[in-house]
Amino acid sequence: MDTNEMPDLEHIIKDIQAIKTALHRHDHVIRQILLPKYFGLMSAYYGGAMLFVFGLFQGFIVYYGAYDHIPPVVRYLLWALFAFATVSGGIIKLVSLTRASRELSGPTGVFSLMREFFILPLRHVYIGAAIGALLVSVYLVQTGLAMLVISVVVLMVGIIWNQLGEFIKSRSYLMVGYWLIVSAGLSFFYVQTYPFAVLALSPSLGFFVFGLLGLWEGHKDRKASHE
């Protein structure tokens, strides 16, 4: 082979370095987007709504004696409020993430941003946790222990949050992650009797506190930038 036709080693090294730089830049951007300050508003709003709805459910159960004894109109209204909070919270989350990505010169568009999340090194953590939670949940439902699904799902979410906290070095993720793990583990003993209390005191309270921590971090960053 003619030496002129051989690949230029210097160009190959530069291409490899350029690819590594691009991958590192995207990885850094995703780490920044995952910071609690970008989830503060959504998490505080959604966690507060869950805490309110499930707290009311538990209060009405104590007052009326059982879930089925709660007036249907009250039950429908609370579930409608929860559905509205879920949809609106999802919209707030997408808007917050796309805005953060734009500020950080990251991927543009919702689908491009989501694709970046699924190529992170952590993808096998949340995919594996989702598969595990699904399989265990199917077993629990078939054995008549459906309420334990709540504890299993919250436990898996806590594990994921701990991994995210280590990935981006965030104490807020770790604090709430450990809260979810511990509270979910303890809830196995009483979730079948007080499912709405578990939903209110474990994931709802955790997400609400995470939102407050995120809002506080965002406030500190804005304050520092104006000094």
Image (spheres, grey):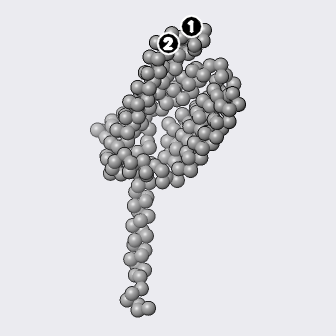
Q: Kindly indicate the quadrant of the structure image that contains residue 35.
A: top left
At 49% from the left and 22% from the top, the residue drawn is 51
Q: CA gap, disc 2 to disc 1?
A: 15 Å
At 31% from the left and 47% from the top, the residue drawn is 102
Label 1's element? Answer: helix
Measured along the vertical axis of the image, is residue 11 above or below residue 220? below
Task: Answer with left or right where residue 13 lies relative to residue 159.
Answer: left
Label 2's element? Answer: helix
Q: How many marks?
A: 2
Examine the rendering and report whether any part of residue 48 can be seen.
Answer: no
Image location of residue 213, percent across then percent down: 45, 32
Q: Which residue is mark 1?
A: 63
Examine the rendering and report whether any part of residue 105 can be seen.
Answer: yes
Task: Answer with left or right where residue 195 lies relative to residue 102.
Answer: right
Q: Residues within 10 Å of mark 1 (few under 14, many from 20)?
A: few
Q: Which residue is mark 2?
A: 72
At 59% from the left and 47% from the top, the residue drawn is 128
Q: Kindly indicate the quadrant of the structure image that contains residue 215.
A: top left
Residue found at the far bottom of this picture: 2
In the picture, which quadrant includes the C terminus?
top left
Image location of residue 218, percent across then percent down: 38, 36
* Amino acid tagged 1: Tyr
In the picture, which quadrant includes the N terminus?
bottom left
Image location of residue 119, percent across then percent down: 48, 54
